[in-house]
Amino acid sequence: MSFSNTGGPAASAPPGLQGHQLVLGGQKSGKSRHAEGLAAAWLSRPEARASVLATAHGHDEEMRARIARHRQDRLPGLATLEEPLQLAQALAGHSQEGHLIVVDCLTLWATNWLMPLSGEADLAGFHAEKERLLALLPELPGPVVFISNEIGGGLIAMSREVRQFVDELGLLHQGIRARCQHLHWVVAGAVFLADAT
């Protein structure tokens, strides 16, 4: 796998954006802006439609404000869908030919299963839903852009729960990447593109 620098987060969609895409980066790396750039390029096509499938829970004031900012900053014509847990079902219900779905984001989706603010973690439920998602992706009629945080590059956490979360998110990224056309690695606003397979 080799990366090429696409020149920044506003880069246009890669040629033949028909398959799924995985956009990875750290917090405030520019990954959401880049994914919206892909959606903007997609929407420039005749008859094209695009939606954001948000996975966040508005569990506190800061998170609710963050969600509101994301909604306000979204492109005109970019519809918003919300599903914090049943991601495969939501994609199956909304995916259509000519309709791009941006999943924002896998990190929060995994958090909702594995580190919920209320209730217990559901590792078995997460694994089952992940397998449904991975099995579904090749069957979807429309492309999906997945956004997620790469959190595995730092120090190994002292907490067993955090170590497990980092491991599970890394394995999820590998499974998603294997079913995507391109991997977009976003660092400090610069975007590096690689064939994902």
Image (cartoon, rainbow, N blue to C red):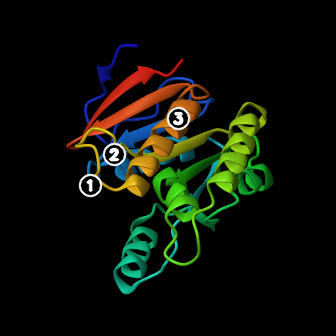
Give the residue displayed 34% in from the left and 80% down from the top.
62
Local SS, label 2:
loop
Residue 186 locus on image (x, y percent):
30, 38
In terms of depth relative to the viewer, which is nearer, 55 or 144? 55
Local SS, label 3:
strand
Q: Residues within 10 Å of mark 3 (few under 14, many from 20)?
A: many
Horizontal placement of 2 versus 141: left or right?
left
Q: Residues within 10 Å of mark 2 (few under 14, many from 20)?
A: some
In terms of depth relative to the viewer, which is nearer, 106 or 185? 106
Which circle, 2 or 1, is nearer the viewer? 2
Which circle, 3 or 2, is nearer the viewer? 2
Circle 1 sits on which residue?
A: 28
Circle 2 sits on which residue?
A: 151
First in residue order: circle 3 vs circle 2: 3
Above or below 3: residue 6:
below
> In the rendered structure, which amino acid carries the disc numbered 2?
Ile
Report the disc number at residue 21.
3
Report the disc number at residue 161.
none
Per the model, the C-alpha gap separating discs 3 and 2 is 19 Å
> In the rendered structure, which amino acid carries the disc numbered 3?
Gln
Does any portion of residue 78 appear in the rendered image?
no
Residue 108 locus on image (x, y percent):
48, 60
Say if mark 2 contacts mark 1, CB within 8 Å.
no
> In the rendered structure, which amino acid carries the disc numbered 1?
Lys
Above or below 69: residue 97:
above
- View extreme (top): residue: 1
Per the model, the C-alpha gap separating discs 1 and 3 is 19 Å
Above or below 76: residue 69:
below
